[in-house]
Image (cartoon, rainbow, N blue to C red):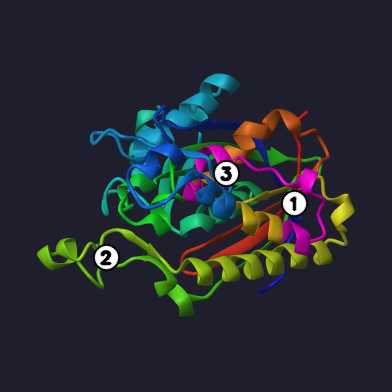
Amino acid sequence: MPQFKKPTNGINASITAIGGYVPDEILSNKKLESMVDTNDAWIQSKTGIKERRILNDPNKATSYLAVMAAKKLISKNLIDPKQIDMVIVATATPDMQIAATSAYVATKIGATNAFGYDLQAACSGFLYAMSMAVGKIESGRYKKILVIGADKMSSLINYQDRSTCIIFGDGAGAVLFEPNKEKLGWQDEFFKSDGGDRDSLKVKAGGSLFPASKTSVLNQDHYLSMDGRKVFKSAVSAMTEAGTKILQRNNISGDQVDYLLAHQANERIIESVAEKMKLHPNKVLKNIAFYGNTTAATIPLLLSDFENKFKKGDKIIFAAFGGGYTWGAAYYIWSKN
């Protein structure tokens, strides 16, 4: 992949506001014990997850989660939504195949002057969406871009399949990107993809290859399926590769990194990546125990939960891996006081 070209006009893109939202309903490991053949100790030992949040309302979808996260960002930071130029929603669970969830979200939050689109890169979606926003900000053409990662994963989960139902939850997080002229914010990125193993993590039906039919419903092909062992190994290898490449390219050692914000897929994956990147455990931020894997929402929820921990000048590494496969890492210097 070509090296990330740093802006030459003196404009970097930085995060100036953050918001997060998870539903109130908690699905605990204990409750899952009554639904499938599993137990709390096994789930925690294999994944690090204690509970996850579920949007258990058939009339509310991913857009609701996204709107709630965006509204928290707007109210907390006194943002005028009419000044937002663009809204990108990273999601694997859009409200509908057509129309774009981002357009509905923008309307609901009052961003009436914004345009937007949905981005689907599974669990890498938010990282990729941030990159899209960064490019637009650094071009000098846009001043405020709202990036949201949101997924109602419960809509894709078979709660009789213990290989997936123990892992995923619902949630959303949002960040606002604006120009920065102090050379802070987004510094570098390294992204890759490989479709060779796409069957390892997929929802088979509902797309143009296998449209919805009576047969697809009876075969339960609209649920998420995953080869856990293969995905685990691939995620560790890919995120380590991308993260290490970022460190090497920017002459940063593990000791110089302040925080790793990795996609919250599995606690053992996160810890393995950190160990291979030679990062001390106290630099690795985690909230997977309480939310599970919220797909595109994991990284923005980390930002929301730990926002008060960051200080200006902190060196942050983002890393993610998702279905496709898609993966990557980015280097960011915290710009907020």
Residue at image point 50% right, 48% down? 293
Residue type of the residue flagged with mark 2: Gly
Q: Which residue is mark 2?
A: 207
Residue drawn at 39 percent across, 55 percent down: 162
Separation of marks 1 and 2 at Cα, in angstroms: 42 Å
- Asked if residue 242 is among those painted magenta in the image, a careful observer would answer no
Amino acid carrying label 3: it is Ile
Instruction: Say which label, 1 or 2, has the lower sequence index.
Output: 1
Q: Is residue 154 visible?
A: yes
Is 31 situated above or below 261? above
- Taking depth in this image into account, of 247 and 49 the one nearest to the observer is 49
**Real-space CA distance between mark 3 and mark 1, rounded to the nearest whole angstrom:** 39 Å
Residue beneath disc 3: 288
The one nearer the camera, 94 or 171, is 171
Label 3 crowding class (10 Å Cα cut-off): few <14, some 14-19, many 20+? many
Q: Earlier in the sequence, mark 3 or mark 2?
A: 2
Q: Residue 102: in sight, yes or no? A: no
At which x and y percent is residue 295? 48, 51
Q: Please name the residue shown 24% across and 36% down the image.
A: 58
Q: Quadrant of residue 337?
A: top right
Q: Position of residue 163 (x, y in %)?
A: 41, 59
Which of the two marks, 3 or 2, is nearer to us in this view? Answer: 3
Which segment did they paint magenta? 273-296
User: On the rendered structure, is 205 left or right of 115?
Assistant: left
Q: Is residue 128 left or right of residue 5?
A: left
In terms of sequence position, does the residue under pointer 3 or pointer 1 come before the other?
A: 1
